[in-house]
Image (cartoon, rainbow, N blue to C red):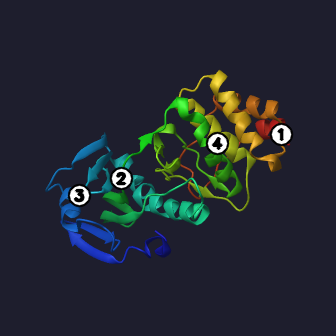
């Protein structure tokens, strides 16, 4: 992992084979280490799976990745280590942009196995109360998010409704998943279309709702100069393609035939 990605995580601890790099603002350090090492239980599970558990503990969201199968071990370095790096790309791009908020990064931890392989790793973020996962009925709230991602050259090929929170009281969008993000040298219309196509597909958004959403994003980006009809046609064709969502440092765009068919 890049050293500057951990520069704000200055407190170092070791416990039961795990190494922890934590922010001085991290609450309940002892309980956090107990949770990660299996000595205590969380207040709540947000998600549970074979490889990933997302848990709530005393104002913290703890995301723990565990790797047991050989195929998981071989790819273990692309989870928490890369998520921390992607988080910092988001911080640089969003700054203090009105209407958006990124949870504070409280920590990173790892249980190393060999070289860049890990038995487990994970991150710790701030828990922001009074938020909810966006629903398909709130689709239009994400228009400024996609416009800003485009302008800042952020390419996140795995955009999903469930990874965007909304705080109604403050009208604030809170992106919570950054893994796989690429920070491009300049805005990319291809990246934008791939992001929107995946976002609509994973959210099971029908065409009668998806098309107005895409039109709204286009209207908010007058500099885009991309024809709406060709753009929408491209999005529908992307739905039939396989484009990997694991692209960090290796961005994958449209096949040549579709790029030439769509480009401004």
The residues tagged by marks 3 and 1 sit, at their Cα atoms, a distance apart of: 49 Å
Q: Between disc 2 and disc 4, whose residue precedes? A: 2
Q: Position of residue 129 (x, y in %)?
A: 36, 50
Of circles 3 and 4, the one toward us is: 4
- What count of labels does the image hold? 4
Look at mark 4 in the image and give the residue it sits on. 143
Look at mark 3 in the image and give the residue it sits on. 36
Q: Between disc 3 and disc 2, whose residue precedes? A: 3
The residues tagged by marks 3 and 4 sit, at their Cα atoms, a distance apart of: 37 Å
Which element type, helix, strand or loop, lies under badge 3? Answer: helix
Look at mark 1 in the image and give the residue it sits on. 260
Of circles 3 and 1, the one toward us is: 3
Residue 79: image quadrant is bottom left
- Is residue 255 shown to the viewer in this render? no
- Is residue 97 shown to the viewer in this render? yes
Residue 156 is left or right of residue 223, and the answer is left
Residue 117: image quadrant is bottom left
Q: Which of 122 and 205 lies nearest the eye of the viewer?
A: 205
Say which mark, if any, is on residue 73.
Answer: 2
Neighbour class for label 4 at 10 Å: few (<14), some, many (≥20)?
A: some
Of circles 2 and 4, the one toward us is: 4
Of circles 1 and 4, the one toward us is: 4
Neighbour class for label 1 at 10 Å: few (<14), some, many (≥20)?
A: few
Of circles 3 and 2, the one toward us is: 3
Neighbour class for label 2 at 10 Å: few (<14), some, many (≥20)?
A: some
Which element type, helix, strand or loop, lies under badge 2? Answer: helix
Taking the spot 66% from the left edge, 52% from the top edge, the residue there is: 148
Taking the spot 38% from the left edge, 53% from the top edge, the residue there is: 128
Of circles 1 and 2, the one toward us is: 1
Which element type, helix, strand or loop, lies under badge 1? Answer: helix
Q: Are marks 3 and 1 in contact (CB under 8 Å)?
A: no
């Amino acid at each position: 992992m890049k050293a500057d990605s951990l520069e704000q995580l200055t407190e170092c601890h070791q416990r039961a084979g795990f190494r922890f790099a934590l922010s001085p603002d991290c609450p309940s350090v002892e309980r956090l280490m107990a949770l990660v090492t299996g000595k205590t239980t969380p207040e709540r599970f947000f998600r549970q799976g074979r490889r990933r558990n997302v848990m709530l503990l005393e104002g913290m969201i703890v995301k723990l990745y565990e790797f047991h199968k050989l195929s998981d071990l071989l790819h273990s370095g692309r989870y928490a280590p890369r998520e921390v790096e992607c988080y910092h790309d988001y911080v640089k791009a969003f700054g203090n942009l009105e209407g958006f908020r990124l949870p504070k990064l409280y920590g990173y931890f790892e249980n190393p196995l060999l070289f860049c392989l890990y038995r487990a790793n994970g991150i710790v973020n701030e828990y922001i109360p009074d938020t909810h996962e966006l629903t398909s009925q709130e689709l239009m709230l994400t228009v400024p998010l996609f416009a800003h991602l485009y302008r800042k050259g952020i390419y996140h090929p795995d955009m999903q409704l469930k990874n965007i929170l909304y705080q109604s009281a403050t009208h604030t969008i809170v992106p919570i998943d950054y893994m796989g993000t690429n920070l491009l040298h300049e805005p990319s219309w291809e990246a934008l279309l791939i992001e929107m196509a995946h976002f609509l597909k994973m959210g099971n958004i029908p065409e009668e709702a998806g098309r107005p959403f895409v039109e709204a994003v286009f209207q908010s980006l007058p500099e885009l100069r991309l024809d709406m009809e060709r753009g929408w046609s491209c999005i529908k064709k992307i739905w039939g393609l396989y484009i990997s969502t694991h692209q960090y440092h290796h961005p994958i765009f449209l096949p040549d035939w579709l790029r030439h068919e769509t480009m401004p």
